[in-house]
Amino acid sequence: MTSLATLFTTVCLHAGELATLVVTTTPQMHCQKCENKIKSNIRFVKGVKDIQTSVEKQQVSISYDANKSTVADFEKAFQKIGYTISVIENTADKKKETKK
Amino acid sequence: MSTKNTISLLSILCAANVFAQTDSTNVNNLEAVEVKGGKFEFRKKLSVENKETIGSTDLLRAACCNLGESFTNNPSVDVNYSDATTGARQIKLLGLSGTYVQMLTENFPNLRGAAIPYSLNYIPGTWMQSIQVSKGASSVKNGPESITGQINVEMLKPHLIDGVLGNIYINSKLKTEANAAGAIRLTNKVSTALLLHAENASMAHDENNDGFLDMPKVKQLSLANRWGYRYKHVLSQFMVKMLHEERDGGQDKHQSTSDRYGIMVNTDRYEGQWKNAYMFLDEHNTSIALILAGQLHDADNNIGKSVYDVNNNTGYAQLLFETDLTPMHNLAAGISYNYDYYKEDVELANPATSNCNGRHRLTEATVGAYAQYTLKLSDKLTAMAGLREDYNEAYGAFFTPRVHLKYSPSKLLSLRASSGKGYRTPHALAENSPLLATGRAIYITPNLNQEEAWNHGISAAFSIPVAEKTLLLNAEYYYTDFLQQLVVNREQDSLLIFENLDGRSYSHTIQVDATYPFTKGFEMTAAYRWQSAKSTYDGCLKERPLTSRYKGMLTLSYKTPLEIWQFDVTGQLIGPMRLYKAVGNTDKTPAYGLLNIQVTREFRLFSVYIGGENLTNYKQKNPIMGADTPWGTNFDATQIWAPTDGIMGYIGLRFKFNKY
């Protein structure tokens, strides 16, 4: 049983490199409708695992598989729905720097 | 999900009490609310009435091609076929037929009279924004006709449609449907929307080989045009709708030789509505509104050798005023006028033994006034009392009192009670035209009484924290007691009698339902309803025929974390019913189960859904009595208690092109 769990964990770890991208949007999000518009479209970018939005903080936080998508993919996806984004944080960059 | 999250305010620019009439609390400051999910939580916490909202997400959990298919996952509302030939369906609420549920579209009475038999097919699923089901005595604002409850359909609003929505559907019986809704905002104040619908079920199928089509061939075209105007304190909405429907059923043309028993029902319907509201005294949410509506309904029924042509025209006007006197006290008052015109041409198959042949004209005007007061003591106690007085030119003056109470001692519990009266004018043939699919002689008692009933109900809604989630538990009891009623008596062989109630008629309904989200995205609802509905037939108090003693329902819904996949399963257990005519040695039907499954895959611009209905393939054997002798007095296609169609698969595509 223990070895099965270990195997499952190993497979999951190698399956993808989970990163978090935090962005702000222009124009700003004003309401739940704006949040829904972002969530219902950005979820189709490859490798996206979770999306959190906050009108209060004016931030969108995206968990994604960095092996499947890049920041440029998100920029394009946001542009399709009328937003440009500014990156506040991308943990995929930090990981790359650490590897260097 | 919190209430705040549950409610998505799609438009908050104007306060419009008049556009959300059924909730007389401060909540109705919202012009439009969209409940995307968690309908039970919404019901339990906000409304003084026992009201469930079927939101936009719920409407996508099944194919929901039209209003009648929107209650698949709802434990309170049953939708049954009226007969085995015309495809007409009727709603049942609290164990009683759909005529006792007041149908509203956007909070004014609609789909009444001659429209009732096929009305569940008249509103396409894609056109609907949400449905509210209120059980028991309802608000007096919409007239006296509600007895077991109200069902209100909110249609898509021009300013709330983000571009173009559409749906294409085909099922294994080769029924196809296509519908679309598109809107454009012409200026900041004016928006318009066009809604289209077409369906075609042209394949003949007779799975039980009785010579009759299991379902009629149906062609329907409908379109609606809406206009919305909003500027500062003024709101106006205008809509026109047209519908044409053809039903062609009965004996299979290819198998029958001569003297075929055919069914042809052609319907043309036109609707118009104009709602205007002016808001002032913002601190009091005060509004005054005028609603004008009209419908022209022309249905030509040819059922066997019986002909029933009906024209039913209706005009409706309501002027209403509503204000919060203080945050604790809300007052609504209004006057209404309703005019109905019926022209019926009746030629029944056996004129020698029926008494209703000929041309009948009827006009009926009803004028009424109402006042409704709501007291809200903190968040714990809400009391709503409504009184209305109406004068009907046929039945004179009548008084309708209704009262509602809601007490929430804590966030975990809401207790509700309601009591009220309802009145309606019955129209024997107009509202029951599918019952002509019988060889029985038809008698209609002259001078039918106005139907009159009391409804009393209590309910308790619990929100119980269990394992960091909330278990929503609801228990309710309703009692409906008729003082006057139109009784459809089929107890004697060879006779179908529409007569006044002579004795007692009532229904008791107890329902318990529970909803629990086991994990994020996975929710289960279980419900059980027991009911006893009895009427007096030929001096004997008997169970109302074709009304199940109980119903059980289990729905499972799972959405993947990003809601890209959705899986929905609905199982139902339908209890035994009394047959008005025994089949073999029994006058009881067996209990049976039904199973529906749907899988939906979302894409960025569209979604694909695939599913199956009646996967248990349960069918009523020989649904048409005397099918081999359709011109005999034993012929009867109206004793229907289970599906006549077997297993059915379907696939569909919904698309949405947003304006970005």
Image: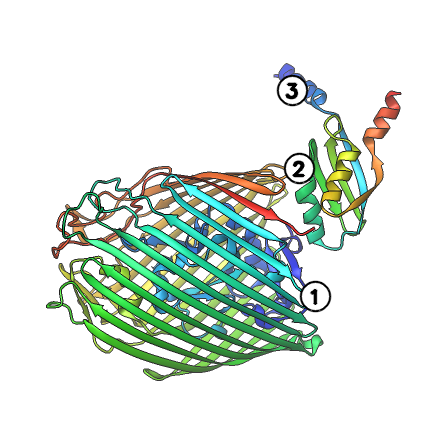
Of residue B154 and residue B269, the one placed in the foreground of this image is B269
The residue labelled by disc 2 is: A44
Name the mark nearer the viewer: 3 or 1: 1
Q: Residue at x 35, y 37 (%)?
A: B616
Give the secondary structure at mark 1: loop
The residue drawn where x is 26% and y is 64% is B535
Q: Which residue carries the number 1 mark? A: B188
* Closer to us: B224 or B569: B224
Q: How far apart in space, not on screen, are marks 2 and 1 (Cα)? A: 32 Å
Q: Is residue B130 visible?
A: no
Left or right: B548 with respect to B17?
Answer: left
Q: Which mark is residue A89?
A: none
The residue tagged 3 is: A8
Q: Are marks 3 and 1 in contact (CB under 8 Å)?
A: no
Of the numbered discs 3 and 2, the one sitting upstream in the chain is: 3
- Counting from the top left corner in percent of width and height, residue B108 is at 48, 70
Residue situated in front as seen by the camera: B56 or B123? B123
Q: CA distance from mark 3 to mark 2?
A: 26 Å
Q: Amino acid at mark 2?
A: Phe
Mark 2 falls within which chain? A
Q: From what the image shows, is residue A88 above or below residue A14? A: below
Q: Tell me what residue is drawn at x 18 percent, y 60 percent.
A: B305
What element does badge 3 sit on? helix
> Do tags 3 and 1 sit on the same chain?
no
Chain that bears disc 1? B
Question: In the image, what residue type sits under mark 1?
Answer: Asn
Displayed quadrant of residue B378: bottom right
Residue type at tag 3: Phe
Badge 1: residue crowd in 10 Å (few <14, some 14–19, many ≥20): few
